[in-house]
Image (cartoon, coloured by chain):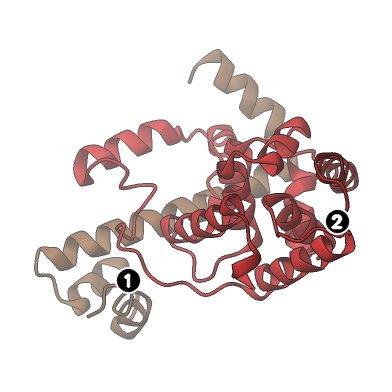
Chain colours: A red, B brown
Amino acid sequence: MFERFTRVARSVVIDAQEEANGLNAKTIRPEHLLLGLLAGGGPAARTLHNQGCAESAVRAHASGLDPKALQSIGINLDQVRSTTEAAFGEGSLDRPGGSRPRHIPFAKQSKKALELALREAIRLQQRDISDGHILLGLLRSEDPSTQRLLRSISVDPASLREEMEESLTAETRPQE
Amino acid sequence: MSTDQQIAVDASSRDPSVGLRAVRSLRALVERLELLQVDNARSQGWSWQEIADHLDVSRQAVHKKHARRRQE
């Protein structure tokens, strides 16, 4: 199915894998796809930014390391990061498992989101699967953890979907 | 602690969403520090048993958690 992905959509998937790797995750989860979408710089990234979905907030959620929450109990994450990096090298706290690329499988929810991306492209009568379709697929899957993540960073899934779909249908005329 | 920090703590100490997020973040931080420290100990030639003793867990537990990741 990847042969129908646009160049940006492919880079989203590759970035998601790298994110999962860096966060030492066992599978590529929807939040890694979200980070890939934000890094992709395409229409989906623009829509996410418009809807107030900031990369730092998604990253804090995906990595489980929330600097503000740690500050509330008196732990300064920047300080921990710099002392750790002084001992173990730059980026050691954020890539603790080393940066050896491992092949990580897609989580069930991510697979479903990518399958639904194809469905969304078909529904909108569009030939290629773009990053926008991946975002729509992610929202369509209604994965509870993704919904929780969006809620926790005050992003409304419904209006996100609406804006993404508008932007996708404005850019292309339906193909006969 | 600075005044700003004190205000943050006072404001959040009873808010479950902040407190629970702090717990979750602390857990994530511990996980990362464990990876770094275990890798460091192994690269300095420590045995799994020595590492397990310092972490106060069984040798099996520490081996199961880290050996495959380190491809040992």
Q: How packed is label 2: few (under 14 Cα within 10 Å), some, or many (20 or more)? A: few
Question: Is A43 located above or below residue A63 in the figure?
Answer: above
Kindly identify which numbered label has been placed on residue A118: none
Question: Is A81 located above or below residue A131 in the figure?
Answer: above
Amino acid residing under circle 2: Gln
> For mark 2, what is the residue?
A175
**Residue, far left:** B45
Kindly identify which numbered label has been placed on residue B56: 1
Position of A174 with respect to A100 (left or right) is right
Instruction: Tell me, yes or no, if residue B14 can be seen here.
Output: no
Kind of element beneath mark 2: loop
Amino acid residing under circle 1: Asp
Count of marks, rendered view = 2
Question: Is A116 located above or below residue A36 in the figure?
Answer: below
From the top left corner, tell me how far across and down residue B16 is, in percent. Answer: 74, 45
Q: CA separation, marks 1 and 2?
A: 64 Å
